[in-house]
Amino acid sequence: MAEKSLEDDPCSGKLTAIFTRAAKHVFGFFLMVVLCNVTHFLLKPFSQPRITSDTFIGMIIGNLGIVHSLIDKSAAQTLRFIIDFGMICYMLVLGIEMDPYVLFKVPTRDAKVAYAGMLSTFILACFLTPYLNYTHEFKIHFTLTLSTALSSTASPVLTRIITSCKIGKSDIGRLVIAAGIHSDFISTLLISIGYIVCPIREKPSGKSRLQEGIEMSSALVLQTVITAKVSPIIMNWVNNENPEGKPMKGSHLVLSVAFMALVCSCSPAYGYSPILSAFMAGIFLPREGRVSKWVISKVNYLLTTIFYPIFFIWMGFEADFREFQPGEIGTWTHLVLLFVITTAGKVTGTVISGVVLGFHWPESVALGLLLSTKGHYQIYLAIAARTVRIYFSIFFTMFCSKETSYILFFL
């Protein structure tokens, strides 16, 4: 019997198809990286942050027909798993950089500015959004979540903006960064607690709301206690065993990362959001020490080089232009009023706090505009709302480009 040719071998054909598909995905990733870098270089003279170019390119690439043909149902699911893992890392690092005990201290100037901007935006959003019909019927949990998201600030994006403008060491720069971190911390903490009361799921869990709430809150409390009490012991021991100037031992790094993964997985085992769980674990992990600095630097490098290009392709893929209805006045009303509510609320709050604290009004307005900055987490929330079939303008994702006008105004 004659041997089969390679062309007749079904295994060979499947392997060729798999490698061809993988090569196309890898090529798309590198194309996204190159286009983002080129666009960022072209926009640099206009003082635009990196997220502006990434959003612009992601919207274009993600809506190409060839991209939609390459990303089938299984590829979309895999892409979503990658995004979820990246957001877990993002929220863990975000939590590590924040101090939860600031809630028990006397509010400083930056805290007062953050509180004023958040409160005014939250009140304005709660008052106006129910009349804009973002959902088919009034839902109090959606209104509260949306209002909290609108009153938040993307502190990592804001920090990069201030740093790129070379004003990070000035008094106003330090004030903006501190107020942004405080606003980001409070809003994310409120959403994390609110998730226990009103969890967002694609499929029902089959349990009563009370049973779900008790299980999630108990698991979250246990996770918080373990993180706050045990993590300093482990991290301090690893830090003492690996002094500065010497390479860190691999076994100690594995132990530290395994402990972080363990505490982050406690509450998700009982239905809590893995992304919010990573944030809640991160805020109680030690901020100082060699291990924490190593985790922050390595995760940020991973996010910048690999995750963000994939994230913005996914964002463009989910923000399907074919579902956009530019001919309807309601589409533009929903889009524009989100900008107006956030901007007016933040500026009103910072102007009022500026009068109390003795700031000049141009500085107070600039503070409000900068604190309105949105970023990756807010984009993820918008797409998550769309995934669970809540009617919500997907162009809420365009919030992250608002710093364009804000930074030009500030300059």
Image: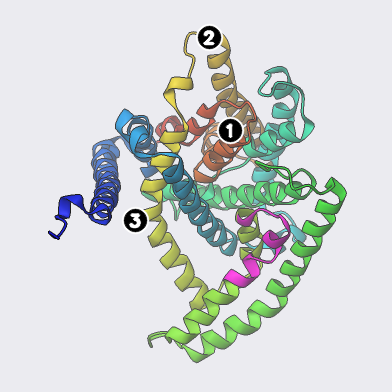
Is residue 189 in view?
A: yes
**Residue 371 locus on image (x, y percent):** 56, 40
**Residue 184 locus on image (x, y percent):** 61, 48
The region drawn magenta spans 261-274
Is residue 248 found inside the magenta-colored segment of the image? no
Q: Is residue 202 above or below residue 246?
A: above
Tag 2: residue type? Glu
The tag earlier along the polypeptide, 1 or 3, is 3
**Disc 1 designates what residue?**
386
Tag 3: residue type? Thr
**Disc 2 designates what residue?**
328
Is residue 272 found inside the magenta-colored segment of the image? yes
Tag 1: residue type? Arg
Nearer mark to the viewer, of 1 and 2: 1
Is residue 410 in view?
A: no
Distance from label 1 to label 2 (Cα)?
19 Å
Q: Is 266 or 6 nearer to us in this picture?
A: 6
Helix or strand or loop: what does disc 1 sit on? Answer: helix
Q: Residue at x 53, y 89 (%)?
A: 240
